[in-house]
Structure formats: structure tokens, C-alpha cells
Image (cartoon, coloured by chain):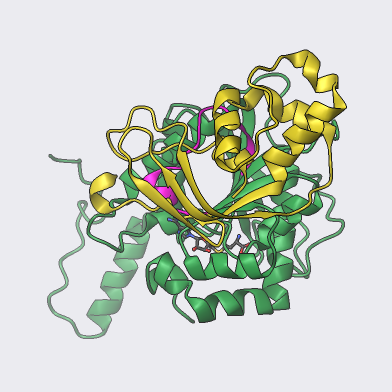
């Protein structure tokens, strides 16, 4: 298996000219970015009054996600750390305004002016500590703090991302909640490793009656994605609470029981080991936590 | 970058308490037509800092915006068209944005402002 891009180099180096070029010549990538953006827009649940909105595209890259925003009639401002990716966006005549910037340094946008934000496949990059000055927690705090401030009250941010593991996902959502957001995680195709997609759906300000939390789609299968041939369970939603960082769930690692220990010890003895401790009433007993 | 975006940006360099509005140095502009949509203009109007917008427009050589506005002008077609043009059609292609407090320059190349901060500015 190839190494995750996030583990290879900092984003501004990884997304160099050739990677950026690759990005937009692959019809598969183009299609996936478009689909993810459509889904993010859906979860953004903008008022359906026909008026175009001003949206942020965080980690806008080559402007593929922005294209979908523009097709839906919206104006957008895109921010990205990679010049090569932004060059491609220029080449593709992106309709949004582009900014070269590092979201880990904060967004630099005035308070309350943005109607909604999306991010497609970018935020997990903030978990990297690829320079000594990069403290992921500080950078996440800076990012979410500035995102919260620049969004209009009652609006949303939908961040699709590829967390490397549960700990990253938790670090990201905790940082979001600490910045004042409420909201939840929507996981599309939760049972397919390949098609599984995480959308962190954030509400700016406390949830109100007119901003319902994202709902799970019906469990009736239906259209199914091309990436999930046999996977028709659509999504699950976990709600996160505002301002209250989710406690690290006690890892529910399967604790191996007494029977298992006894069996293993027996096996060792049968293999001729002589240093296997006797079986006593203490064998595999739970120890008290000592500090 | 258009004035819509300029009106939303502020300098977030460490220690800056009011980074808005960024000054504009323009050495090249471009005009690209955008479909007129009065719904968007009415929607965005309350969010625009008008004085900053008018000043920014002037620094791009656009002088036909009124200094003072009120909601009733959103019914006036002439006004909406000059608002639309200045907000969405004129692009700053080459130049710089300047922090009003510290004078820090953010260069603009090929329409893209470089807002990256140095380590010691974060
Ligand atoms: C998978 S690409 C997504 C591209 C984009 N949605 C598109 O349509 O092309 C991830 C993008 O996140 C950007 N990125 C990563 N870390 C970033 C950071 N700290 N600040 C801004 N952009 C970042 C990368 O440069 C890259 O363009």
C-alpha cells in the first residue's frame, strides 16, 4: 500500500506542479471531488431562496470543488497553501477568488460575513507536525477559531476529510467544538473501507429550530455510489455537543479473559517452555489501577 | 481578486488589532464580465463595509459609487449596476495589499494575494 500523502511531505511540497497536474487530469479525481462537493453543499443546507451565497472553499486547490459551487450559482473565495494547485485553478479559469494562505495560521476574514464554508479533502493536513513550528493542536485551534468568527450566525461549515485514524478524527472534532461550533459527524458508507466518507458538519452558534442538524438519509439503499458496489447503507450520524469536548472514549479493546490466558499458558507448556508461571487464583485477574 | 473578497479580508498577523481594510496598490487590473444578479447584491449589501468599499474602488480608478448609501438605493437599477461592476467584475491582477496597522505588504500576483505569514508573524 502506498503511503498517505500527509505522511510524505508538507502540503505545499506534496502538491507540487506534477501532483497538481495529475490532480486535474484524472477523470476519477475530478468526479470524486465533484461528488463530494455536491454532498457537502447538500449538508450545508443553504436557504433555498434562489439568492447566490458567499461561500468559502477551504483548501480549494485546483478549483475542482469550487467549480461545483459556481455551477450551483454561488460566489466563492478559495484558500490554499499550494501555489501549484492554485496555478491549475487559474488555468481552469476558476470563478472564485483565490488566496494563497495557510489555514493553520487562521483565515483572516472579517467576522460574520461568510454564508457557509466547505472543505474537500484538506483539513486532515492540519494534523501534521511537518515543521518544528507546527503544533497541530495550536493550528487546529487557530483555524477553527477564525472559521467560527467569519461565519454568519446560524450558518454552517461542512468539512469532508480523510482522517488517518480515530485519534485524528477526535482531535479535529474536539478542536471544532472548543471553538464554539456544535454539530456532528456524518459518515457516508460507513461499512466500506474504500467508499467511507467523513463529513464534519458544523453549526455556527447554538443549534436552533430553523437550523436542523444534518439527518441521516433513509436506510433503503437506493442510488448507491459507484465506489460502493455492494454497500447500500448510507450513513450514520454522530452528534457532538457544543463547547464540551468529547471525552476520549475508554478504549473498548477486547480484554482477553482468564480462559484465554489459561489456554495460552497451556500451549506454552506443551511447547516445552519451563518458565510459564503456575495457574493460581490470581491468574488474569484485573489489577487495581495504581498511580 | 475582486473587491467582494477585498471587503471581507483582514490582516491576521500576530498583534494586529484592526487589520481592516487592507490598503490597495494596483499595477494591473482586469475586467471580466459576470452575470448580473440583483438577489445576490441585495443579500450581500448589508455585509459590505461601505466606506472601505468606496475607497478600495477609488484605488482601482472606479469613481462612480456614492459615498453614502441607504437601503432604498437597492431599488435603483443604476446604483445596482455600478455596485455589481465594482464588486464582482474588476479584478486586481498585480499589486499588493497593505495592512493598515503595520504596513505589512501582501503581494498580489496573477490575481492571487499571498497571505502567507512568516513563522514570527503567527
Ligand atoms: C486533496 S486536495 C483538495 C483539492 C480541492 N478540493 C480541489 O478541488 O482541487 C487538498 C488541498 O488542501 C490543501 N492544503 C493542505 N494543507 C493546507 C493548509 N494548511 N492551508 C491551506 N491549504 C492546505 C493542499 O494544498 C491541497 O490543495
What is chain A's hue in the picture? Answer: green
Residue B39, position as x, y percentages in the image: 82, 31
Looking at the image, which residue is at 67% across and 47% down? Answer: B90
Residue A77, position as x, y percentages in the image: 61, 47
Q: Is residue B8 left or right of residue A233?
A: left
The C terminus of chain B - image quarter: top left
Looking at the image, which residue is at 55% across and 74% down? Answer: A20
Q: Is residue A166 left or right of residue A154?
A: left
Task: Please say whether residue A108 is one of the residues in the magenta stretch.
Answer: yes
Asked if A22 appears above or below A92 in the picture, the reply is: below
Residue B64, position as x, y percentages in the image: 70, 31
Question: For the magenta stretch, what is the residue range?
Answer: A99-117
Q: Name the foreground residue: B74 vs B67.
A: B67
What is chain B's hue in the picture? Answer: yellow
Residue A125 image-quadrant placement = bottom left
Asked if A77 appears above or below A51 in the picture, the reply is: below
Residue A3, position as x, y percentages in the image: 44, 77
Q: Is residue A92 left or right of residue B19?
A: right
Looking at the image, which residue is at 30% across and 77% down? Answer: A267
Q: Name the foreground residue: B31 vs A273.
A: B31
Amino acid at each position: 500500500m502506498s503511503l498517505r500523502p500527509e505522511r510524505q511531505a508538507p502540503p505545499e511540497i506534496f502538491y507540487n506542479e506534477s501532483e497538481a497536474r495529475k490532480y486535474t487530469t484524472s477523470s476519477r479525481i475530478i468526479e470524486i471531488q465533484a461528488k463530494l462537493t455536491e454532498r457537502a453543499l447538500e449538508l450545508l443546507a443553504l436557504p433555498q431562496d434562489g439568492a447566490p451565497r458567499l461561500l468559502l472553499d477551504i483548501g480549494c486547490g485546483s478549483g475542482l470543488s469550487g467549480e461545483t459551487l459556481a455551477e450551483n450559482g454561488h460566489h466563492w473565495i478559495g484558500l490554499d497553501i499550494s501555489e501549484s494547485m492554485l496555478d491549475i485553478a487559474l488555468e481552469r479559469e476558476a470563478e472564485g477568488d483565490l488566496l494563497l494562505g495557510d489555514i493553520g495560521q487562521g483565515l483572516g476574514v472579517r467576522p460574520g460575513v461568510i454564508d457557509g464554508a466547505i472543505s474537500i479533502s484538506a483539513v486532515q493536513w492540519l494534523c501534521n507536525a511537518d515543521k518544528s513550528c507546527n503544533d497541530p493542536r495550536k493550528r487546529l485551534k487557530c483555524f477553527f477559531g477564525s472559521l467560527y468568527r467569519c461565519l454568519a450566525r446560524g450558518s454552517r461549515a461542512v468539512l469532508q476529510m480523510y482522517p488517518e485514524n480515530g485519534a485524528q478524527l477526535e482531535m479535529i472534532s474536539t478542536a471544532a467544538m472548543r471553538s464554539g461550533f456544535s454539530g456532528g459527524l456524518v459518515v457516508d458508507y460507513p461499512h466500506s473501507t474504500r467508499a467511507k466518507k467523513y463529513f464534519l458538519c458544523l453549526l455556527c452558534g447554538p443549534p436552533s429550530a430553523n437550523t436542523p442538524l444534518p439527518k441521516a438519509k433513509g436506510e433503503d439503499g437506493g442510488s448507491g455510489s459507484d465506489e460502493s458496489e455492494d454497500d447500500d447503507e448510507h450513513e450514520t450520524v454522530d452528534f457532538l455537543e457544543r463547547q464540551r469536548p468529547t471525552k476520549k472514549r475508554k478504549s473498548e479493546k477486547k480484554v482477553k479473559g482468564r480462559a484465554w490466558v489459561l489456554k495460552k499458558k497451556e500451549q506454552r507448556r506443551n511447547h516445552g517452555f519451563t518458565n510459564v508461571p503456575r495457574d493460581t487464583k490470581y491468574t488474569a485477574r484485573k489489577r487495581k489501577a495504581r498511580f | 481578486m475582486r473587491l467582494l473578497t477585498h471587503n471581507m479580508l483582514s490582516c491576521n498577523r500576530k498583534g494586529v488589532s484592526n487589520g481592516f481594510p487592507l490598503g490597495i496598490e494596483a499595477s494591473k487590473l482586469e475586467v471580466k464580465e459576470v452575470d448580473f444578479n440583483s438577489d445576490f447584491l441585495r443579500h450581500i449589501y448589508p455585509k459590505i463595509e461601505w466606506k472601505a468599499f468606496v475607497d478600495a474602488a477609488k484605488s482601482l480608478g472606479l469613481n462612480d459609487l456614492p459615498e453614502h448609501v441607504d437601503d432604498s438605493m437597492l431599488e435603483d437599477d443604476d446604483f445596482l449596476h455600478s455596485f455589481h461592476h465594482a464588486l464582482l467584475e474588476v479584478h486586481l491582477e498585480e499589486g499588493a495589499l497593505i495592512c493598515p496597522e503595520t504596513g505589512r505588504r501582501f503581494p498580489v500576483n496573477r490575481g492571487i494575494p499571498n497571505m502567507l505569514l512568516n513563522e514570527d508573524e503567527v
